[in-house]
Amino acid sequence: MSPRLLPREERPVAIAVKEVSKTYGRGRDAVVALDRVGFEVHKGEIVCIVGASGCGKSTLLHLIAGLEKPTAGALGVSGGGTSLMFQDPALFPWLSVAENVEFPLHSHGVAKADRKARVAELLELVHLEGFARRQPHELSGGMRQRVALARALANASHVLLMDEPFAALDAMMRDRLHEELERIVAAERLTVLFVTHNVREAVRLGDRVLLFSSRPGRLVAEFEVDLPRPRRIESREVAELAARVSDCLQDPGHAVARAPAAVAAVS
C-alpha cells in the first residue's frame, strides 16, 4: 500500500460517530443494540470492528449508511455518501458482470458513454476486464465478490462500509482479496470501515481494530496496528496482536476503553 502522506490525526475525519445508541422496540420488549458508541475514522484509514454475534456491528454500518436512524447520538460522513458491501455479493443474476457494475451508474443518471468507460475502468481495477459479458453464475465466489466491490465503487463514494464481505470464502481466496482491497484502497483513496468475526483478518487489514462488547454493543477497546504493509495473516506479528485482541474479546470486562469522542461536525 502507498505510504500515508500525513499522520492520521492530521487528516480530515471521514466518519464521525458520537454517543450513538440504537434501541429496537419499546418497554419490556425493548432491545438495546448499541449503547453510547463514539469514535472517528480518518480519511484513508482501514478500521476493523470485531465483537461477538449480536453486538451491533452490522447495525452500526446500517446507521452510518443511512438505512436506519439512531435512537440517540449523531453520525456524520464526509462527502455525503457511502457504499455498503455485504457477505452475500447480491448480484443481479439476470445481468452480466458489466451490467451489474453499471447499474448504480445508470441509477445516478450517468451518460451512457461515461458509464461504459467507468465500468471498463472498474473491471480493470478488480482484475475482471476479461469477464464483462459473463453471468454471475459463471464466476467463482471470489470473483463475484470482486464484482460486488466494483459495483460498490461505482457509487463514487470515498467511504466503503464492509460487512463480513470475505467470510464465506476459503482462506486462499480471502488472502488474495485482502491484497486486492489494500491495493484498491490506495488507488481510489478510500476510507474503509470493515466488520469481521475473524480477529486475524482484522489485524491483517486494519490500521486500527475496535473491539465491541456483547449486547448492548459498546466500544470497550481500541488497538493500533503498527505493523508495516504488506502483511501476512499467518505472520508471527499478526498472530501476536490477534491473540491480544482475542484475549480482550474473551474478557472484555478488563478492557480499557480508549475510543476518542467523535466530533459533531465532519470536515
Image (cartoon, rainbow, N blue to C red):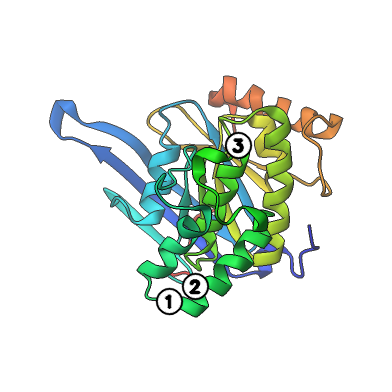
**Label 2 Cα neighbours within 10 Å, binned few <14 / some 14-19 / many ≥20:** many
Distance (Cα) linking label 3 and label 2: 25 Å
Residue linked to disc 3:
140
Is residue 228 visible in the rendered image? The answer is yes
Q: Residue 191 sits in which quadrant?
A: bottom right
Q: What residue type is labelled 1?
A: Val
- Residue 190, percent from left and from top: 61, 62
Residue linked to disc 1:
110
Residue at 56 percent of width and 71 percent of height: 118
Q: Which of 51 and 181 is in front in this view?
A: 181
Mark 1 falls on what kind of element? loop
Residue linked to disc 2:
115
- Residue 205, percent from left and from top: 69, 44
User: How many numbered marks are there?
Assistant: 3
Mark 2 falls on what kind of element? helix
Residue at 45 percent of width and 76 percent of height: 112
